[in-house]
Amino acid sequence: MEEERKEVAATNEAEQKPVEEAFVAKDVSVTEMNEKEVELEKADASYTATNIQVLEGLEAVRKRPGMYIGTTAGPGLHHLVWEIVDNAIDEALAGYCTEVHVTINPGESITVVDNGRGVPVDIVGKTGLSGVETVFTVLHAGGKFGEGGGYKVSGGLHGVGASVVNALSSWLDVEVHKNGNVYKIRFENGGHPTGRLKQVGKCKDSGTIVTFQPDPTIFVETTTYDFITIRDRLRQVAYLNRGITIIVTDARGEQKVEEKFCYKGGIKEYVQFINHNKVPLFDEVIYCEGSEPIELASGSVSHVYAEVAMQYNDGYSKNVYSFCNNVHTHEGGTHEEGLRLALTRVINAYARDNKFLKENEDNLTYDDICEGLTAIVSVKHPNPQFEGPTKTKLGNFEVRKILSGIVGDQLNRFLMENPKTSKAIMEKIVMAANARLAARKARDSMRKGGLELTTLPGKLADCSSKDPSKCELYIVEGNSAGGSAKNGRDREIQAILPLRGKILNVEKAQDKRIFANAEIGNMIQAIGGGIDPDFDINKIRYHKIVIMTDADVDGSHIRILLLTFFYRFMRPLIEGGYIYIAQPPLYKVSYHGKDYYSYNDEQLEVIKKQLNLKPGYPFQRYKGLGEMDAEQLWETTMDPSRRKMLRVTLDDAILAEQVFTDLMGDNVDPRKEFIHTNAKFVKNLDI
Ligand code: TSJ
């Protein structure tokens, strides 16, 4: 094929015309110009202005990357991928793209390919630049140019735009296949185009290919992508957008790793995936969907689309997860409220009509209804309002009614049409209500008996400060390590609670036994905020709760048990980022009277090199915390100015839930697997 190398300002008519030619100022009055020419004149004038603004805009992103992507640490690096992928998903939601391919290349660049219409190549009047260059250089330009761009849902947590990715990349290549032509443009050094968009060849297909290299001078902490993080997120996106094929490839190693996700059933399959190692109460997944028109500020009408999938399992935990525009809304919001209203209303009405509730009995509560319920709520909204401390709470008030309406009607119908399933659901919920009433009775009688536990546990070595925002609670595996920690700590702000052996498996145990377990009781008392549903974050006595366990299989098992406990009984602690994992060193090298600690294998090698040690020079491998004395523990793991800790976040609560239940549930194989690859869990946590 002969390559035609031409610079293109591809308006439909002016297609194939070099940019310069298209922009030659014509000596004609405006009235004589056709519409296209007027547009091009405008474009010409705005081009120079844009050029300056563009570079200033991208420079602003480079000066304060945190403002755009939150952090330049690992999550920010991955944010770049979500940002580009969102654009391809939007194209799929608009109905023009079926496949998205994401590759981690050797050298940590990322390629995203879709088979959509291709980013527009025409000159955009407002900027004087091609659509492609506009998207990649004008802040917040994504999709706004060109009318009828289809239904865009990005712009949630992500949605800062492809230009931000460009600004934070050392280079970025774009290839667009469109109108039978292949177009290319390259940007370097934080978004500077190396030339205009050029037509470089011919093709029969259509689509967009973007490859970018994150700038190591911006992402100073790490430029290494985590395949698991990318794979898990893309799988989630595939579940949330039924029918889209997403292929993820890790091409960095000697052997390519590739996974392909496509779910015809969408969130119905997602619910089954979450329930896969639980026992569903019935096979089918209840599914409701619908869409409602909504007027935008501009006066144009768009649609809110909502869908819910639900299935009960024989467990007791509530697993309701909500999303808006493919972003997990950790803090819930109006979509979850709408679901709650509908569930409470419809279930109570059905229970009364069918005599599962007697006339004199109180209504079933939402908590009763949620025991053993796995549900996914997914909303696509053209103008989402995200609220709350972490901006993951959907605020649009109209969504409440939309969800309540859709779920109300369709759930009611499902219950009418499936009496057997309905009976199983009702019996389960009524049982939950009875348990709740019995527990309340027990609590009441305990209060009357004055048996409430208010004293602090004897094993707790508390700190002297009473200011929770300064205080830290170290939960330490084993009494001997507990002893070292007690002696090595800063008594002013650090409290130590040693744990003996393994705490109870909270996933399996009945409520009653949990409270009888001494280790659990000690933690509840020490932390001081009670437990769900009455957990009160305002009453907690420490704002940092640090899990300190050995770096072995037992240690990681205990850590996961503790996390399960917090997840089940004090979830706000995890959601609020109060839980940390201590990072004790793995190795110590003593050399000329000085000790050098390293926290991983690579670091050990670096130390050996720097000290110029001969091969075979001895070093200590710590098998447990107990091998360190008080001073060493303080220096390496507890001193706030020197320690390294992982903050536990439930970035993807669903995956965490999966880890917990795989580890704790009756299904033994995944448990074995998880214990052996237990590092995985901690890897999924953000720093
Ligand atoms: F944003 C981006 F440039 F990074 C990017 C955009 C990256 C990737 C991988 C894909 C895309 C993208 C954009 N795929 N498909 C599109 N589609 C459009 O931008 C498009 C195409 C046609 C029309 C039209 O109205 O004809 C409108 C739009 C928004």
Image (tube, helix red, strand yellow):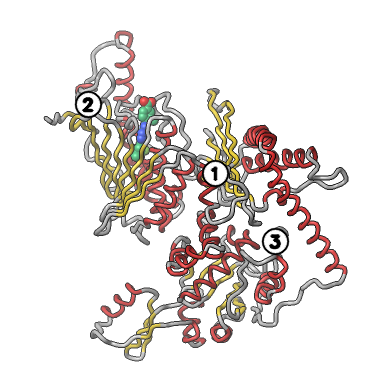
Whether pointer 1 and pointer 3 mark residues with C-beta atoms closer than 8 Å, the reply is no
Q: Is residue 608 left or right of residue 419?
A: left
Q: Which of marks 1 and 2 is in front?
A: 1
Q: Distance between the residues labelled 2 and 3?
A: 65 Å
- Per the image, the residue denoted by label 2 is 19
Q: Given the current orientation, which residue lies at the most extreme front position? A: 420
Could you say whether the residue bearing mark 2 is in a helix, strand or loop? Answer: helix
Q: Which of marks 2 and 3 is nearer the N terminus?
A: 2
Q: For ligand 1, which image quadrant applies?
A: top left
Residue with the most extreme bottom position: 593
Give 317 or 211, whichever is nearer the viewer: 317
Q: Percent from the top left, x then y, of residue 518? A: 68, 77
Which percent across, then down, holds residue 513?
Answer: 70, 70
* Residue type indicated by callout 1: Phe
333 to 6, vertically: above or below? below
- Alpha carbon of mark 1 to alpha carbon of mark 3: how far? 25 Å
Task: Tell me where residue 464 sits by quadrant.
Answer: bottom right
Disc 1 marks which residue?
323
Does the beta carbon of the residue at mark 1 sit less than 8 Å from ligand 1? no
The residue labelled by disc 3 is 535
